[in-house]
Image (cartoon, rainbow, N blue to C red):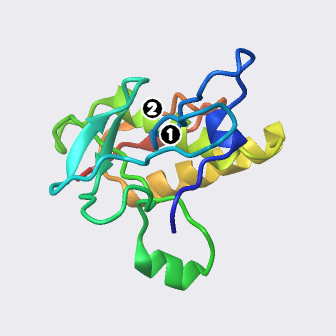
Amino acid sequence: MVHKCDNYCLGDNVKSEPRQCRFEYGKETEYGKADTEGRELSDTSVIAVDRRGIEHFRLKRTKSKKVVQHCVPVLHGWRANSDVQLLLYRSHPDKPDMTEIENVCQYVVAYASKKNHTTKQEKEAIQNIIERILKRDLLLPTFTCPCSSSSDDISGVNAL
């Protein structure tokens, strides 16, 4: 699986100047060529901060500048394209920061509904699934999920 830049990731440019890939695979040499160089090679895995200030775990990249970060067992099981990202927490596992949990909750709901025009009911259904998982699996003090419009209480997160 390799990334090939196109108008989706490069966007449109009214000035007809070379465009930058929004997934950080580089800048095209000439407007319309979509010939980005790819990401830098690296011998180690790192936590990198993107242009929006969001931290991402980047696996080492020793052979290809264009290969997409992926998980082989997921690809074999799902038999389709998948997007694998680690969600990073900076707080201590025994004392989680509820703001981090809120941010992850909002990210997951937004990501799950991004490509299609998801109805309010579908978004609420996704949120309810997340809340049920949290209620079932998590053992920390009760809090109200800030992503949800409901007033149901859910449990916190342990061992993040």
Q: Where residue 136 sits in the image (x, y, percent)? A: 45, 60
Q: Residue at x 72, y 49 (%)?
A: 125
State the residue in front, 29 or 13: 29
Locate residue 86 relative to residue 159 in the image: left or right. Answer: right
Locate residue 119 relative to residue 47 in the image: left or right. Answer: right
Q: Where residue 153 sits in the image (x, y, percent)? A: 50, 38
**Helix, strand or loop at mark 2:** helix
In the image, residue 64 above or below residue 156: below
Say which quarter of the image contains residue 24: top left
- Asked whether disc 2 touches disc 1, contact meaning CB atoms under 8 Å apart, the reply is yes
Q: Amino acid at mark 2?
A: Glu
Q: Where residue 79 sits in the image (x, y, percent)? A: 61, 81
Q: Dot 1: within a 10 Å radius of its alpha carbon, few (fewer than 14), some, or many (20 or more) residues?
A: some
Identify residue for label 2. 102
Q: Dot 2: within a 10 Å radius of its alpha carbon, few (fewer than 14), some, or many (20 or more) residues?
A: some
In the image, residue 124 above or below residue 14: below
Residue that lies at the very extreme toward the front in this rendered image: 30
Q: Is residue 73 visible?
A: yes
State the residue in front, 38 or 130: 38
Say which quarter of the image contains residue 143: top left
State the residue in front, 157 or 55: 55
**Helix, strand or loop at mark 1:** helix
Q: Where residue 42 sits in the image (x, y, percent)? A: 21, 52
Q: Residue at x 53, y 31 (%)?
A: 20
**Mark on residue 105?**
1
Q: CA distance from mark 2 to mark 1?
A: 5 Å
Q: Is residue 143 visible?
A: no
Q: Amino acid at mark 1?
A: Cys
Locate residue 69 relative to residue 57 in the image: left or right. Answer: right
**Mark on residue 38?**
none
Q: Residue at x 44, y 46 (%)?
A: 37
Instruction: Count the marks.
Output: 2
